[in-house]
Image (tube, rainbow, N blue to C red):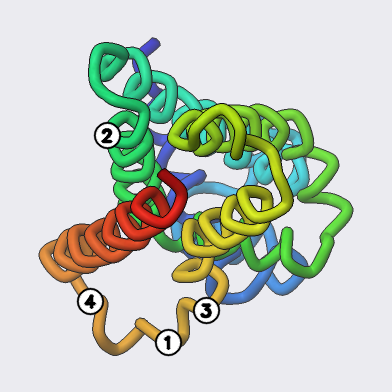
Amino acid sequence: MKKNPTKQKVVDAASILFFQNGFHGTSVRDIADKATVNVSLISYYFNSKQGLLEHAVTQYYEAYLKAIETAMLNNESISPLERLKKMIEAIIHYKQSNHQFSCFIHRELSLDSVFVREMTVTYLAKENYFISNSFYAIFPKQKKNNLDSQFLLMQLKGMLITPYILQNEWKNQVVGTDSHNQFAKNYIRTIENWLDYVVAQNI
């Protein structure tokens, strides 16, 4: 379905402001001014700031999970390890291409924000299912789901979110599209090297 350009402009403006000022620190007037639209238009499209947030979160996660599923479906014939790497590549590229909203969501989740967690619980469960199953598939049968592999899975999940929780560590180094792409490339390589080491230790 083709997106409404004006509606998307409002979502993009809100994403920037939520990232910069937080949800409660951003007013509907701020969003309207940033998007150069009338305040009444936001009410027409989303009813409220909460409705706008719900729309943005839903749009973000549906596209995110679709990117993961596509990576999995397109790489069914390769080894579990290489398939996992393709999934990780899709995850980092998606989060990096939606950097500000990724940071906003992960920051809110790290604070256990009820208003975000209630909206994302189903999406997070599905994300966890994809990542966990793909990760455990790289281990020999006897080592799946043991305590060590559970700890390693926790480490992997941590690596997938760290740049978006600790974004201030990178704000001066990652500026502009080319810089974002280079960061994604380097960070994916780092995770892949870690995975290769994990597999070598658990064969």
Residue 36 visible at all:
no
Quick check: marks 4 and 3 in contact, CB under 8 Å?
no
Q: Earlier in the sequence, mark 4 or mark 3?
A: 3
Q: Earlier in the sequence, mark 1 or mark 2?
A: 2
Instruction: Say few, some or many: other residues with alpha carbon within 10 Å of mark 2 (under 14 / 14 to 19 / 20 or more).
Output: some
Alpha carbon distance from label 1 to label 2? 29 Å
Q: Nearer the viewer, mark 3 or mark 2?
A: 2
Q: Residue at x 32, y 29 (%)?
A: 83
Quick check: marks 1 and 2 in contact, CB under 8 Å?
no
In the image shown, does 151 or 26 lie closer to the viewer?
151
Residue 160 point in image, percent of width and height: 48, 57
In the image shown, does 115 or 131 lie closer to the viewer?
131
Quick check: marks 2 and 4 in contact, CB under 8 Å?
no
Circle 1 residue: 169
Residue 133 visible at all:
yes
Alpha carbon distance from label 2 to label 4? 30 Å
Circle 2 residue: 82
Q: Earlier in the sequence, mark 2 or mark 4?
A: 2
| Residue type (three-letter) at the residue carrying disc 4 | Val
Q: Residue at x 30, y 48 (%)?
A: 93
Residue 51 point in image, percent of width and height: 74, 38
Which image quadrant is residue 55 in?
Answer: top right
Q: Nearer the viewer, mark 2 or mark 4?
A: 2
| Residue type (three-letter) at the residue carrying disc 1 | Glu
